[in-house]
Image (tube, rainbow, N blue to C red):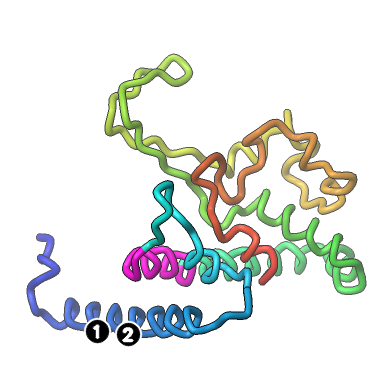
Amino acid sequence: MKVPAWLPIASNRRYYRALARVDRLIYDFIDAKEKESDGSDDLLSMLLQVRDEDGSRMDRKQVRDEAITIFLAGHETTAITLSWTMYLLAQHPEIQEKAANGSPEYVSHVIHESMRLYRPAYAIGREALEDCEIGGYRVPAGTTIFMAPWVIHRDARFFDDPMTFRPERWENDFAKTLPRFAYLPFGGGPRIWIGNNFVLVVA
């Protein structure tokens, strides 16, 4: 039986206390950033400067919602990316040594190759807003479709020797030669994850 969230049992009380703590932290970040006037171009500054089509800004609750997504999901995906990267480097000491002594560009290739083999989130879901047909299959409105980049990233049509961890494949602007959506560690289209550069910089 699903327990209603409003029922004041111990687990629900712990959840709402934790949520209130995260909210205080996020709103403190927002308050501090609003007082700054240094022209920062970090993610939170960008959220505070975003304008809607009518010129209006997001209200504090909307900024909080966007910021908390980046705060939680961004750290989680970064940690997962780093974990898989360390796992792969541990299996390939020669690549590990080259990354330790190499250029930032080579380290970037290592991260991209790690995300190709082990994307931080294994699936992407999208909901059909209206009836449509995809690949000969009828998709009713309201249906959620899940895509698996894990499969796409291992497709030999796009990646030579796809099961091998080979950062060198990303040299010479290899990414620009790929078809659209053949490599999508952060999703794609208008819903691409806003924190993609954040993950790469932190990693």
Closest to the observer: 199 or 63?
63
Of helix, strand and loop, which one carries label 1?
helix
Q: Residue at x 52, y 70 (%)?
A: 44
Where is residue 177, by image quadrant? Answer: top right
The amino acid at mark 1 is Arg
Residue 117 in magenta stretch: no
Between 17 and 157, the one nearer to me in the picture? 17
Q: State which region is magenta.
A: 59-72
Residue shown at the point (68%, 63%) measured from the top left: 200
Quick check: 137 left or right of 164? Answer: left
Nearest the eye: 109 or 66: 66
Q: Amino acid at mark 2?
A: Arg
Residue 34: x %, y % from top left: 47, 79
Q: Which mark is residue 40?
A: none
Q: Is residue 198 above or below residue 141?
A: below
Q: Which mark is residue 21?
A: 2
The x, y position of residue 174, in whole percent, is: 82, 41
As drawn, 198 above or below 53: below
Q: Of helix, strand and loop, which mostly describes the magenta segment?
A: helix
Badge 1 crowding class, 10 Å Cα cut-off, few under 14, some 14 to 19, many 20 or more, is: few
Against 114, residue 39 (above or below) is below
Asked if the stretch drawn in magenta spans residue 64, the answer is yes
Q: Which mark is residue 17?
A: 1
Kindly state the secondary structure of the residue where label 2 is placed: helix
Q: Residue sitting at 49 percent across and 59 percent down? A: 50
